[in-house]
Amino acid sequence: MKVLVVSDVHANIAALNTILEKEADYDILCCAGDYTDYGIYPTEVIERFRSLKNTHLVYGNHDLHVINTYESKEWKNVEDGKYKWVHYNCEQLNDQGIRWLKQLPETAYFEADGWKYGIAHQYDSGYGTIESRYAFDKYWAEHYGTDNTGNRRLIFGHTHRQCIHILGDGMEWLNPGSASYRRPDDPDKTAHYATITDGEIRLKQIPYDRKPQFEKAKEFISTDKMMRTEIQDFMFFFGDAKTSREPLELRNKITITEIKRDGKR
């Protein structure tokens, strides 16, 4: 059996579609949240997930932020210079999309190839990780019941950092990384995800078309509407800016290097 694991898609339909095309033979798909915010196609991402079969999905903290912002109506009257990608996402979404986000659970559970899996967006309210078998058992009991027998794995998102932590025999947790973008200390521009085939975990990366995200950020540079830091993040995540705080005065020097599917520039 093949399990496809994604997380933190962040309204990036190009990255999501690239992964789904590559791993079209999956049997189960799970997503550890953050379908929206910091991207430009939230509705398309939601509709894509709605169309998929055999899924186990949970919400993320950015999804909650989008829900709360949308329902507060604050996105309708944002002052110039304070506009963020969350406001842009709210403009693109409708009531149906918000209802879909709201029906997502905090945790999910499934079994495959002799393993029990628990899914959640994040371990705690910050960027904490499970570093001991005691902490693993405690978290499992709180969210998935007191039966701690058999092989168990936890799947988290949120940090945007790929990893596999083996705490003992049959006790592991993993993060597939973000399908959309890295943290500021990681210049990698590929989409990150994981597959679990017959119980074997593989962390993967694949190039995708970053141009739509990059071009949208460039559109906002010429106005005073978007917060400068929000634009700078995009120029780094999806363009070739050297840092996430590259001066926007250098925007004409910031380009996008296309990466082919074989990973070559």
Image (spheres, rainbow, N blue to C red):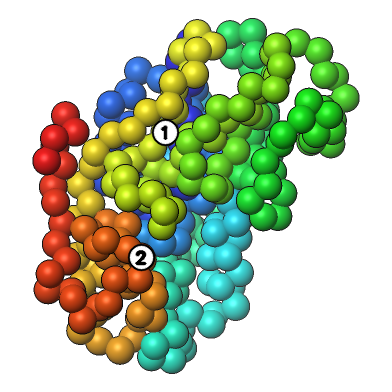
210 vs 74, left or right, is left
Check the picture and name the quadrant holding the C terminus.
top left
Q: Is residue 256 visible?
A: yes
Residue at left offset 44%, top offset 21%: 202
Quadrant in the picture for residue 118: top right
Number of callouts in the render? 2
- Residue carrying label 2: 244
Q: Mark 1: which amino acid? A: Tyr
Residue 69, x across and y down, in percent:
56, 73
**What is the three-letter code of the residue carrying label 2?**
Ser
Q: Residue at x 54, y 47 (%)?
A: 159
Q: From what the image shows, is residue 231 above or below residue 50?
A: below
Image point 16% across, 29% down: which residue? 262
Disc 1, SS: strand
The tag earlier along the polypeptide, 2 or 1, is: 1
Query: Which residue is nearer to you in this view: 146 or 161?
Result: 161
Q: Is residue 27 visible?
A: no
Residue toward you, 78 or 161? 161
**Percent coordinates x, y for residue 138 in the rendering:** 84, 33
Question: Which residue is depicted at the point 18% across and 74% down?
Answer: 251
Is label 2 in a helix, a strand or a loop? loop
Q: Residues within 10 Å of mark 2 (few under 14, many from 20)?
A: some
Look at the numbered discs 2 and 1 and tell me whether their residues touch, using CB distance below 8 Å.
no
Q: Which-is-in-front pick, marks 2 and 1?
A: 2
Q: Position of residue 196 (x, y in %)?
A: 48, 18
Judge by depth and name the residue closer to the eye, 187 or 101. Answer: 187
Judging by the rendered image, the residue that carries numbered circle 1 is: 193
Residue 145 vs 65, above or below: the answer is above
Closest to the observer, 81 or 64: 81
Residue 84 percent coordinates (x, y): 42, 75
- Crowding around mark 1 (Cα neighbors within 10 Å: few <14, some 14 to 19, many 20+) is many
